[in-house]
Image (cartoon, helix red, strand yellow):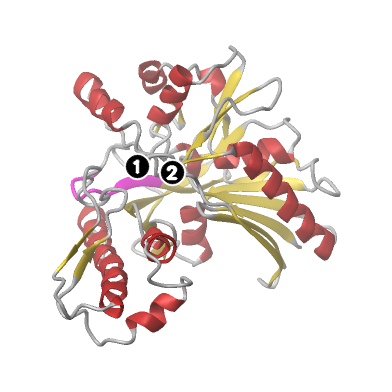
Amino acid sequence: MSILVIDVGTSGLRASVVRDTGAIEHLRYEAFAPQSPAPGLVEFDAQLMRDAVLRVSTAALQAAGSVSAVGITNQRASTIMWDRATGIPCGPALGWQDLRTVMECIMARSEHNMSLAPNQTATKASWMLKNYSHSANVCFGTVDTWVAYVLSNGELHVTDHSNAAVTGLFDANSHKWSSRALDIMGVDVAMMPNVVPSSGVIGAASALPGAPPIAALVGDQQGSLVGQGCISPGMTKITFGTGGMLNVFTGDRAPDSARRNEGGTFPIVAFSNNGALSYATEAIMLSAGTNIEWLRDDMGLISSSSESHDIASQCETTEGVAYVPALLGLGTPFWDYGARGSIFGITRGTTRAHIVRAVLEGVAHRGVDLVDAAEKDSGLS
């Protein structure tokens, strides 16, 4: 069996063919970084994403030949609204890092005792309905929903449990969209995708050569958790991408609540299969690789991301320089969206190498924060 895997991340997207041996072949990649038109705003053009997905997927298939199935994995909670009749987005998609709805989250807590974060879908969807011109025939989706819609030529409007459960609009007990959350956000349930298992054929990718069946949807972090074999309680992975995500597999016992835990982590659905759901606990660093991009693109201290290692290795320590990687606020355990990146301990002897090393170490120290929080909340070592 050969599977076409489409991975749509925050900074780029790729398609490759995975053989039954585990070999990854015919990788095709395109950079696809979001735009930040103002501080705290993160958005992207969903039509350009559609075109890029079709390009990399078609190129991989042309090189590999036919495949048995298509699997989709994606950045989560980024939100797209489009016209169901035309398939045209109503405006820029809002990336998961977007902070424009911080006040709406505060109001939801104070007025409705509803715990939401701006990096979830709920307040993004509500904001779009209020701020984009649209007809009554609109629908919402996260990136997996949009990619499945594109690949099926508009036939599918779906998401899986792993993606739905991080939107802030999903009822953890009934495994359906929460009517209360939708009412508060002003979103009609008819606008939301059907929730399907993470694994199982849901339709044909008729936009691709050969129209292979789409047989998997899963959020990228949960896909990484399973892909690295972390499917026994306590097994943990941490991914340092654009953001940093730590996940601890907790098993098949459903959490008591979808609300944020005392230590600043969230219960999530790891995956669903054959009607059964498995769960995990997640700790989040809002900016990880973003800090390296900042060194490269904005500060000009490195010419490539990989050069950060060589520059940092020019000194054995930072000589007291410390960096707080809060370019988009701080996630677990603090959840302070007003926090900003900071550099401390600079002296006349501070060099480029000290700064670069401090940034790398700052990201690593935030990783320790995530581990500590996940152990506290899960009770697992």
Residue 37 spot, x, y in % from top left: 44, 40
In this view of the protein, which residue sits in the foreground, 358 or 84? 358
Q: Identify the image quadrant of residue 370.
A: bottom left
Q: Residue at x 68, y 73 (%)?
A: 23
Question: In this picture, is 355 found above or below 273?
Answer: below
Q: Quadrant of the N terminus?
A: bottom right
Q: Residue at x 58, y 39 (%)?
A: 45
Estimate the spatial distance between the alpha carbons at disc 1 and disc 2, rounded to whole Å.
Answer: 7 Å
Q: Quadrant of the C terminus?
A: bottom left
Q: Identify the image quadrant of residue 245.
A: bottom left
- Element at label 1: loop
Residue 29 spot, x, y in % from top left: 65, 61
CB atoms of marks 1 and 2 within 8 Å: yes
Q: Is residue 212 left or right of residue 297?
A: right
Task: From the image, tell me which residue sits under label 2.
Answer: 36
What amino acid does circle 1 point to?
A: Pro
Q: Is residue 35 left or right of residue 237?
A: right
Q: Identify the image quadrant of residue 25.
A: bottom right
Question: In this picture, is 40 found above or below 61?
Answer: above
Q: Is residue 169 visible?
A: no
Q: Is residue 280 left or right of residue 331?
A: right
Q: Residue 39's mark?
A: 1
In this view of the protein, which residue sits in the foreground, 203 or 296? 296
Crowding at dot 1, Cα within 10 Å, few <14 / some 14-19 / many 20+, comes out as few
Q: Residue at x 72, y 68 (%)?
A: 19
- The magenta-colored residue range is 261-268
Residue 89 spot, x, y in % from top left: 61, 28
| In the image, residue 219 lies in the stretch drawn in magenta | no
Question: In this picture, is 350 found above or below 362?
Answer: below
What amino acid does circle 2 point to?
A: Ser
